[in-house]
Amino acid sequence: MLTFVIYKSILCVVVFGVSLGVAAYSTWWERKFAAFLQDRKGPSRAGPFGILQPLADGGKMFFKEEIIPNVSNKFLFVLGPSLFLLTALMTGVVIPWGKDLIIGGKAYPLQVTDINIGIIYVLGVTSVGVYGIMIGGWASNNKYSLLGAIRASSQMISYEIAMGLSIIALVITAGGTLSFREILEKQDAGISNVMYQPLGFLIFLICAFAETNRAPFDLSECETELIGGYNTEYSAFKLGAFMFAEYINMFISSAIMAGLYFGGYNFPFAHELYSAMGLQEGSVAISLIGFLVYFFKICLFISVFMWIRWTLPRFRYDQLMNLGWKVLIPLSLFNLVLTVVVEFFRGTIVF
Amino acid sequence: MQLTNRRKVVSNKEQSFAEKIYLPAIVKGMAITFSHLFKKAPTIDYPNKTRPMAPVYRGQHVLKRDENGAERCTACGMCAVACPAEAITMESGERKKGEEHLYREEKYATIYEINMLRCIFCGLCEEACPKEAIFLTDRLVDTDYERRDMVYGKDKLVEKIDQRIDVSKRQTPEVLEFKKIPGLRHNELYKKIK
Ligand code: SF4
Ligand code: SF4
């Protein structure tokens, strides 16, 4: 029991640390990558290649003046970013980061908890995250913040439907389980779900952009119209919390996409490779390789997020809503029906 | 009248299906940005590396001293007349007894100011000077926070006795030859003063 508690605590802390670390370094990579795409060099002053830039940024955030507007509701004003950051960090617990570590005959799963409704948990928690934005924008008592918050929440709510529908299609293909772990195990042979669900993946990808408020759907914080959207009034570390949470969200949604659609820690010919390298199934090395592969996939997805951001201009608000309601939802319904029909003929589902 | 052949006629035609779903255009755009990933950045890592400069680069001015260390400028005002940007102002004074080692001529500039914000670094002052007192050098003019600090006085313009500034770089044979051309404005002015 004690080892269990210690193990889980360590894992929690590690997931927490990794999320924060990845978020911090995403900001660095975002700037670097943007620079590369624009034929620039990006941050290069702090350490070699600007590696220490996130530390400098974080330090700056800490030492900035904390401003709470006089007319704002102070409790809610602080609650907003806290809630957003909290929910962003909470989603990391259901993601299996690798195969079980087997030490001394005992299996230590690289997943904080395997709830059998893991996917629904993630969807639920991320939609609670909207409250963070809504509360923050509303409590600022500033019309730009409020408009940004309204946009963010309506956008998230609209895109959640299409996202959920595309996940249902995926769950049907994956054999009716909502547990992350089982969906990942199903892709053990190296054939990832994206082969069966290309359309679903596309819908999920677009929705993920909208859910994380990333370009081209970042209208909730567009500078040109709304100054800064819901974080107009925020400064110092509360602003930092908002930004951090956004990067964590990006990290988690990359992890979800890489896991659900691209096999997570599985990769094609994994077993052949392991036996060629003379590794025992279930050894620590395999878990480690699996974790690194997963991490690599996540980094690729994060880069795709950035790639899109530095390619596409922002959508107009009505375009965004049209795309969400008139295109993505019908499309995901179609995808769902198609999946059911195909799976029925494949014999995976019976009525 | 058609100036270039890059004109495009805009039309309000209905979008085709491929245009409506955006995806082909998005993929095309992403391919373009991706191709830039492998292009070399034209950035010059400035404080560590500097761009090669032309030998005749016209930068911050210097007021020269002669070989004995006396200021060459005689406050004739030719440079100020020649200056198209009206960047130069000066006040003249008479040399006292015992100041011969400080000023070469009997009349000298007590105040000599160049407003670096007005100056366009055309080099006409250098061309105009009959005493070979003012030269443009390859030094860059530093930025500053205050406008008034950008008006350089004699303290910044006159070269230090122990730190002479080499102005020979700019005086290439071509430049020297150019300065001799009769009919150039400074030559005309010079003749008039004489
Ligand atoms: S370089 Fe040209 S603009 Fe500048 S002070 Fe000399 S004459 Fe005037
Ligand atoms: S033209 Fe030469 S000598 Fe005359 S005032 Fe200018 S710098 Fe001095």
Image (spheres, grey):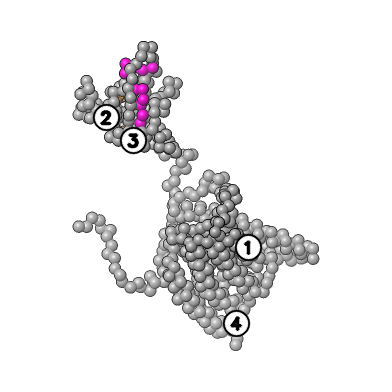
Query: Residue under mark 2: which chain is it in?
Result: B
Q: Nearer the viewer, residue A214 or B26?
A: A214
Return the x and y of residue B67 as percentages of the image width and height. 38, 17
Q: Which residue is mark 4?
A: A348
Sequence-first disc among 1 and 4: 1
Residue appearing at x 40%, y 32% in the figure: B139
Q: Chain of mark 3?
A: B
Q: Quadrant of the C terminus of chain A?
A: bottom right
B54 horizontally vs A125: left or right: left
Asked whether the residues under the numbered discs 3 and 4 touch, taking CB atoms below 8 Å apart as contact, a structural biologist would say no
Question: What is the three-letter code of the residue carrying label 2?
Answer: Val
Q: Which mark is residue B119?
A: 3
- Is A46 in the magenta? no
Q: Could you tell me which secondary element the residue under label 4 belongs to?
A: loop
The answer to whether mark 1 and mark 4 are in CB contact below 8 A is no
What residue do we see at 41% from left, 69% from top? Answer: B22
Q: Is residue B30 left or right of residue A196?
A: left
Q: CA distance from mark 3 to mark 2?
A: 13 Å
Residue at the far front in the pictured view: A71
Q: CA distance from mark 1 to mark 3?
A: 58 Å
Label 2, on which residue? B81
The amino acid at mark 1 is Leu
Residue at (60% x, 86% y) in the render: A350
Give the percent coordinates (x, y) of residue B5.
Answer: 25, 58
